Image (cartoon, rainbow, N blue to C red):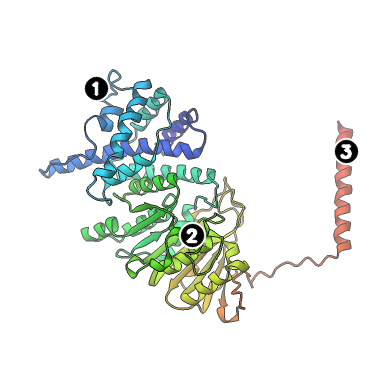
Amino acid sequence: MKYETTFNAIDDILRNECSSELDYIGQTSWLLFLKYLDDLEKEQELKAELSGKEYKRIITGQYRWSVWAAPKNSKGELDVVNAMTGDDLVDFVNQKLFPELAKFKDTAAAYNTIQYKIGVIFSELRNKINSGYNMREIINKIDTLAFQSNEDKHEMSVLYEDKIRRMGNAGRNGGEYYTPRPLIRSIVEVVKPQIGETIYDPACGSAGFLCEAFVYMQKQIKSVADSDTLQQRTFTGKEKMELPYIIAIMNMIFHGVAAPNIIRCNTLAENLANIQQKDRKDVILANPPFGGKERSEVKQNFEIQTGETAYMFMQHFIKMLKAGGRAGIVIKNTFLSNGDAAGVRRMLLEECNLHTILDLPQGVFQGAGVKTVVLFFTKGEPTKKIWYYQLNLDRNLGKTQPLDDNDLADFRSLQKEKTDSENSWTLDVSTLGDDCDLSVKNPNKPEVVDTRTTADILSAIATLNEDSARLINEIREML
């Protein structure tokens, strides 16, 4: 990728300013965003000029990227005389640029406009680049990036996603991990969202599910009306944490959604009793955080009381789906068997058709140390049969060997007809007990039972100890 070196160089500079990957992406993001927006406005200006119309810029005067960040001389090169640097640059950004752009939140005509989103971004983010010389160096590198062509925009979104991945793996709080994009793409392909349907992620993080759904649905556009529907009336995301909320907005904009409907709130604090039909969604795609803590009054919002946030979210998903609505949900595999989740499992099986469970191997979520499953269900009729697929790979997943699209090809193929195979099987729900235990038990791969006696195991341990002692002595003699 032609821009990868530039992104890496920016990170190298930020190491002198920021303490973690979380800060790297926040600081890179607002600068990238303003350069991206400047290129977009130039493109809109040109289109308007060619059609004999006038384009009114969103960001004007001294706040334009091409004025404060990258003024050019007559040769199209950086005007080093007028380009701010050092304390002058930092003072301008902190005291003028951010406050001015933050005002857009109050002056925008509506919340679903790019102006409002700019106001949100610069109200929430703070500049943490304290050296104006480092900032100047970063700006100069970002100014070399071009976002006019589809190829450039695609590469930028891929590189940005990689930064989000690193951010996600650095910010391991309350089960908040980056969801691998190959997994998201497979989930979207199984759920098959269509233009005209509403897509919802109430724990959206960096909006990976919404971005991939947008990419998938773009291929369905056949008219201007389709495009308008996809842009304005399709996606809703909610996020509790500040940085992921901002990243989600920018990530969707970089992917092509002009004014993303991302709301900052605690979804679990919303009373399920107040949900009306107009609030319900056609499709829910999510990887809810697990292990978090909520106040006692939040827990009261749920029919089934639980201290596990993921189980609260499961109840939210069920209530928020329209009749006939579909969901693809990543969740910790203990949901399938834990006693404190039995009530939520029963609710799911009674109110929805849980037609597919994808069992994922360890290592899908790098460094998380947890196993997860994906639940696919449709609301409106009870579950009768569940098709399981156990993803068995010939390698251990990790940082150097992440999950890829090919790993899930067999699952996507067999899922269409729910075909049984060495890695897939069907469970009749009528055989379940009162606890609705949905544990993954592959009948095609019987569990290996250790038949050794206690004496056998102790003897084996003693042998290993003797071997270890002998090896240590041999090493000592060699030394």
Residue drawn at 87 percent across, 33 percent down: 478
Residue at mark 2: 298
Q: Which image quarter: residue 33?
A: top left
Q: Is residue 474 left or right of residue 421?
A: right
Residue 273 can be seen in this image: yes
Question: How busy is the neighbourhood of tag 3: few (under 14 within 10 Å), some, or many (20 plus)?
Answer: few
| Secondary element type, mark 1 | loop
Front label number (3 vs 2):
2
Q: Residue furthest left?
A: 52
Residue 418 can be seen in this image: no
Q: Which image quarter: residue 139?
A: top left
Residue drawn at 36 percent across, 45 percent down: 250
Viewer-nearest residue: 59 or 138: 59
- Which label number is shown at residue 73? 1
What x and y, as percent, mark residue 14? 46, 31
Amino acid, disc 2? Val
What x and y, as percent, mark residue 88? 34, 22
Residue drawn at 87 percent across, 49 percent down: 465
Whole-number angstrom distance, CA of label 1 to CA of label 3: 74 Å
The relative height of residue 453 versus residue 101 in the rendered view (above or below) is below
Q: Residue furthest top?
A: 81
Which sits earlier in the primary sequence, circle 1 or circle 2? 1
What x and y, as percent, mark residue 315? 48, 67
Whole-number angstrom distance, CA of label 1 to CA of label 2: 58 Å
Residue drawn at 30 percent across, 42 percent down: 119
The relative height of residue 172 versus residue 387 in the rendered view (above or below) is above
Residue at mark 3: 474
Where's the C terminus, which quadrant?
top right
Question: How busy is the neighbourhood of tag 2: few (under 14 within 10 Å), some, or many (20 plus)?
Answer: some
Amino acid, disc 3? Glu
What x and y, as percent, mark residue 118? 30, 42
